[in-house]
Amino acid sequence: MAREAPDGARLAIGLGLDPGHLKCGLAALDAERRLVFHRVVPADQLDAALADIVAGFNVVWAVVGDGTRSAQVTAVVARHVARSVVYVRDETGTTLLGRERYWREHPPRGLWRLVPTTLRLPPVPIDDWVAVILAERFHDDFSASQAGS
């Protein structure tokens, strides 16, 4: 899973996490806001997934949605990225945005194209796309604050 930066070092990423009871969405962005990866992992496998990510990448920041199991997920993330800062952010409305993003990335075919996005349910969990939204929002806020300082 690891990708190297041009200088041969581990690629620096920011992580977005959408916590949940049964599963957790994960997404990573590089410094230029490019999506490095996204996936959904069972909640009981989050610890192992984060260990793999930290082994392959330099995690610079992590943002966790403030919904279900946020405190538990934040604690797991903090164990793996102790030198990085872990932020908790409002995730209001991100499920709908994640659904819209899923359909933008995976356009429906055939007659499904005629059904409004709000009436279509994705055939797979979209927690990873919610994590992408959280990561992109945080990246944009962080970049804006760096530009203003």
Image (cartoon, helix red, strand yellow):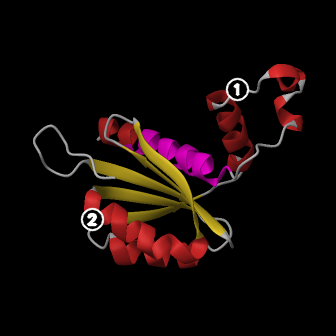
> Dot 2: what SS?
helix
In the rendered structure, which amino acid carries the disc numbered 1? Pro
Question: Over which residues does the magenta segment extend?
Answer: 126-142
**Above or below — where is 40 with respect to 45?**
above
| Residue 58 position within the rendered picture, expressed as x and y whole percent measured from the top left | 25, 57
| Residue 71 position within the rendered picture, expressed as x and y whole percent measured from the top left | 56, 76
Q: In the image as oriented, which residue stretches furthest toward the left?
A: 7
Does residue 10 appear to the left or right of 47 in the view shown? left
Q: Can you identify the residue that label 1 sits on?
A: 107
Q: Who comes first in sequence, dot 1 or dot 2? A: 2
**Above or below — where is 113 with respect to 9?**
above
Confirm whether the magenta stretch covers residue 90. no
Does residue 10 appear to the left or right of 1 in the view shown? left
Query: Residue 114 falls in which quadrant of the image?
Result: top right
Query: Residue 145 falls in which quadrant of the image?
Result: top left
Does residue 81 appear to the left or right of 88 in the view shown? left
Q: Would you call the spot at circle 2 few (<14 residues within 10 Å), some (14-19), or many (20 or more)? A: some
| Residue 55 position within the rendered picture, expressed as x and y whole percent measured from the top left | 27, 65
For the C terminus, the image quarter is top left
Q: Residue at (36%, 57%) from the top-left corner?
A: 61
Q: Residue at (85%, 26%) from the top-left corner?
A: 112
Dominant SS of magenta comes to: helix
Q: Residue at (19%, 42%) from the top-left corner?
A: 5
| Residue 1 position within the rendered picture, expressed as x and y whole percent measured from the top left | 34, 52
In the rendered structure, which amino acid carries the disc numbered 2? Ala
Q: Can you identify the residue that label 2 sits on?
A: 55
Q: Would you call the spot at circle 1 few (<14 residues within 10 Å), some (14-19), or many (20 or more)? A: few
